[in-house]
Amino acid sequence: MTTPSADPDPSDTPGLEEGNGVRPGDTPPSEAGTSGLSSHEAKEPSGAVNKAIPIAIVALVFLFVLFLLVRAAWPS
Protein backbone atom coordinates (compact mmCIF):
# COMPACT_ATOMS: atom_id res chain seq x y z
CA MET A 1 0.00 0.00 0.00
CA THR A 2 1.42 3.38 -0.94
CA THR A 3 0.82 6.60 0.92
CA PRO A 4 -0.66 9.53 -0.98
CA SER A 5 1.72 12.29 -1.96
CA ALA A 6 1.76 15.35 0.27
CA ASP A 7 2.01 17.44 -2.91
CA PRO A 8 -0.45 15.89 -5.40
CA ASP A 9 -0.12 16.39 -9.16
CA PRO A 10 -2.62 19.11 -10.17
CA SER A 11 -3.52 17.26 -13.37
CA ASP A 12 -4.75 14.29 -11.29
CA THR A 13 -6.50 16.30 -8.57
CA PRO A 14 -10.28 16.41 -8.96
CA GLY A 15 -12.11 19.72 -8.57
CA LEU A 16 -9.42 22.03 -9.94
CA GLU A 17 -10.06 24.48 -12.76
CA GLU A 18 -7.49 25.59 -15.29
CA GLY A 19 -4.68 27.44 -13.59
CA ASN A 20 -5.06 25.13 -10.58
CA GLY A 21 -7.86 27.23 -9.08
CA VAL A 22 -10.69 25.78 -7.03
CA ARG A 23 -14.28 26.12 -8.20
CA PRO A 24 -16.52 28.20 -5.93
CA GLY A 25 -17.99 25.99 -3.22
CA ASP A 26 -15.35 23.26 -3.58
CA THR A 27 -12.94 22.37 -0.83
CA PRO A 28 -9.30 22.70 -1.88
CA PRO A 29 -7.10 19.59 -1.69
CA SER A 30 -5.69 18.86 1.72
CA GLU A 31 -2.19 19.99 2.51
CA ALA A 32 0.39 18.76 4.95
CA GLY A 33 -0.09 20.65 8.19
CA THR A 34 3.14 21.83 9.76
CA SER A 35 1.88 24.80 11.73
CA GLY A 36 0.35 22.91 14.66
CA LEU A 37 2.04 22.12 17.93
CA SER A 38 3.66 18.72 18.22
CA SER A 39 3.46 18.48 22.00
CA HIS A 40 2.34 20.38 25.07
CA GLU A 41 4.41 23.49 25.71
CA ALA A 42 4.97 24.45 29.31
CA LYS A 43 3.78 27.85 30.46
CA GLU A 44 6.50 30.38 31.10
CA PRO A 45 6.78 31.86 34.59
CA SER A 46 4.86 35.05 35.23
CA GLY A 47 6.51 38.45 35.11
CA ALA A 48 6.58 38.62 38.91
CA VAL A 49 8.66 35.44 39.11
CA ASN A 50 11.00 36.70 36.40
CA LYS A 51 11.62 39.84 38.48
CA ALA A 52 11.75 38.12 41.88
CA ILE A 53 14.56 35.69 41.04
CA PRO A 54 17.21 38.31 40.14
CA ILE A 55 16.14 40.46 43.12
CA ALA A 56 16.55 37.47 45.45
CA ILE A 57 20.01 36.70 44.03
CA VAL A 58 21.14 40.32 44.48
CA ALA A 59 19.76 40.33 48.04
CA LEU A 60 21.63 37.12 48.92
CA VAL A 61 24.90 38.47 47.49
CA PHE A 62 24.38 41.73 49.42
CA LEU A 63 23.77 39.85 52.68
CA PHE A 64 26.83 37.66 52.13
CA VAL A 65 29.06 40.69 51.48
CA LEU A 66 27.57 42.44 54.52
CA PHE A 67 28.32 39.33 56.62
CA LEU A 68 31.94 39.31 55.42
CA LEU A 69 32.36 43.04 56.17
CA VAL A 70 30.91 42.70 59.68
CA ARG A 71 33.07 39.66 60.39
CA ALA A 72 36.21 41.43 59.15
CA ALA A 73 35.45 44.50 61.28
CA TRP A 74 34.58 42.47 64.40
CA PRO A 75 37.35 42.68 66.98
CA SER A 76 39.05 39.39 67.68
Image (cartoon, grey):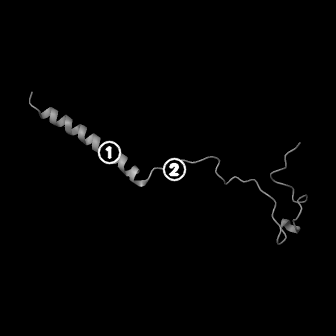
Amino acid type of the residue that numbered disc 2 sits on in the rendered structure: Lys
Q: Amino acid at mark 1?
A: Ala
For the residue pair 73 and 14, the one nearer the viewer reads as 14
Q: Is 38 placed left or right of 44 in the picture?
A: right
Quadrant of image for the N terminus: top right
Q: Could you say whether the residue bearing mark 1 is in a helix, strand or loop? A: helix
Residue 9 in the image: above or below residue 25: above
Q: What is the x, y in percent for residue 7?
A: 81, 53
User: Does 8 sit above or below residue 58?
Assistant: below
Q: Please say if the residues under marks 1 and 2 sit with CB atoms less than 8 Å apart.
A: no
Q: Which mark is residue 41?
A: none
The image shows residue 21 at horizontal and vertical percentages of 83, 67
- Circle 2 residue: 43
* Residue 56 disc label: 1
Residue sitting farthest toward the top: 76
Mark before the other along the chain sequence, 1 or 2:
2
Q: Is residue 66 above or below residue 8?
A: above
Q: Quadrant of residue 16?
A: bottom right
- Which residue: 33% across, 43% down? 57
Quadrant where the image shows the C terminus: top left
- The mark lying in front, picked from 1 and 2, is 2
Q: Residue at coordinates 65% horizontally, 47% vertically from top-left? A: 38
Q: Nearer the viewer, residue 53 or 21?
A: 53
Q: CA distance from mark 1 to mark 2?
A: 22 Å
Residue 67 is left or right of residue 17, and the answer is left
Q: Residues within 10 Å of mark 2 (few under 14, many from 20)?
A: few
Residue ID at (30%, 44%): 58
Horizontal side of residue 65 vs 57, given as left or right: left
Crowd band around label 1 with a 10 angstrom C-alpha radius: few (<14), some (14–19), many (20+): few
Q: Position of residue 43 (x, y in %)?
A: 51, 50
Q: Is residue 25 above or below residue 1?
A: below
Q: Position of residue 33 (x, y in %)?
A: 72, 54
